[in-house]
Image: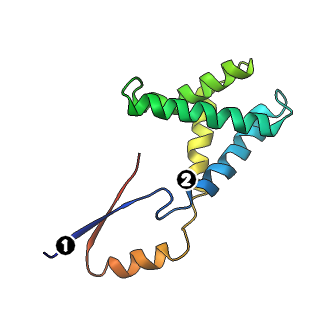
Amino acid sequence: MTYKTLLFDLDDTLLDFTLSEEKSLDRVYYKFFQEEISNKALFESEYHSVNRLCWDAVEERRMAIRKLGVQRFRILCRNLGIELDCSQIAQVYESSLAQYATWLPGAEEAVEVLSQYYSLGIITN
């Protein structure tokens, strides 16, 4: 059997999502939350809890994926007892993810080599 196309998962296969997420959360914290929440560790912990619950809801089809970006920040703000523009926060967070995208070691080179022999595609949630 000869393969013509290879598909790669984007996050933590080609790109270091953990690093991108960390930098993006830093940006969001300092831009929107720092004055309201002085404990950055609390902010991060609460974000990760809320984010996991939202992804669980998406996977269980209780939340549309198109709503996840803003909804996680709405829930986060509600849990932290603050009112902020969650649409703007989501936009900054998502644009930061792209801005801070970083190849995992060897991934860019692998893609370059494989692209000479295969059609390549990327999938991600």
Q: Is residue 61 left or right of residue 82?
A: left
Marker disc for residue 98: 2
Q: Amino acid at mark 1?
A: Tyr
Question: Which tag is nearer the camera, tag 1 or tag 2?
Answer: 1
Q: Residues within 10 Å of mark 1 (few under 14, many from 20)?
A: few
Q: Quarter of the image containing the N terminus?
A: bottom left
Q: Residue at image x 68%, y 44%?
A: 25
Distance from the alpha carbon under mark 1 to that under mark 2: 30 Å
Asked where in the image residue 58 lies, by quadrant, the reply is top left
N-terminal label among 1 and 2 = 1
Q: Residue at image x 57%, y 29%?
A: 72
Question: Which color mode does the image show?
Answer: rainbow
Q: Secondary structure at mark 1?
A: loop
Q: Residue at image x 48%, y 56%?
A: 11
Marker disc for residue 3: 1
Q: Is residue 51 left or right of residue 8?
A: right
Residue 74 x %, y %: 60, 23
Above or below residue 120? Residue 62 is above
